[in-house]
Image: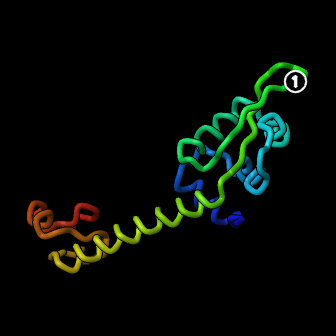
Amino acid sequence: MKLPDSLIHELLKTLSKNISLDLVLAFKDKPNMNEFKLAEKLGLTVNEVRHHLYKLGEFTLVSSIRKKDKKKGWHVSYWTFDNVKARLFLIDRSKKKISELKTEIKKENEGQYFLCPNKCMQMEQLAALENNFTCTECGT
């Protein structure tokens, strides 16, 4: 199941600003991409590509296999982006965010808040009392 580019972008915003969007888009629908070819395609060094791939690996969004190059004798990793895990990761993050927002709404409905006349901020009752019912933003 392919993930749209917009969801990939949202995923990377959630994970880390350090992961290259171009890298993920380059191999998200192509299994077993050679890391050297990815680096060449993106104009990055192999170490930079590996860095981004290892970051994705921390969230188990990629898998890799290593094979020995018969000509050069080097080990080459082939990477696959896991669209299913990425989708599940986004769903899980969305559910957590919804839960946090529901908790915040419940807290606001149950508590007593004071709103600045200029609508700079709102404070809980105790914080307003500690600040002598004065807005810490504008002073009213």
Quarter that holds the N terminus: bottom right
Secondary-structure class at tag 1: loop
Q: Position of residue 3 (x, y in %)?
A: 68, 64
Q: In the rendered view, does 28 fall on the left or right side of 9?
A: right
Q: Position of residue 45 (x, y in %)?
A: 76, 31
Pick the front one: 43 or 32:
32
**Crowd tier of the residue under label 1, counting other residues whose Cα lies within 10 Å: few below 14, some 14–19, many 20 or above:** few
Q: Where 119 sits versus 53, above or below? A: below
Q: Amino acid at mark 1?
A: Lys
Q: Residue furthest bottom?
A: 109
Residue at the image position 9 percent from the left and 65 percent from the top: 129
Residue at the image position 84 percent from the left and 26 percent from the top: 69
Pick the front one: 137 or 8:
8
Quadrant in the picture for residue 102: bottom left
Q: In the rendered view, does 130 fall on the left or right side of 11?
A: left
Quarter that holds the C terminus: bottom left
Q: Position of residue 106 (x, y in %)?
A: 25, 76
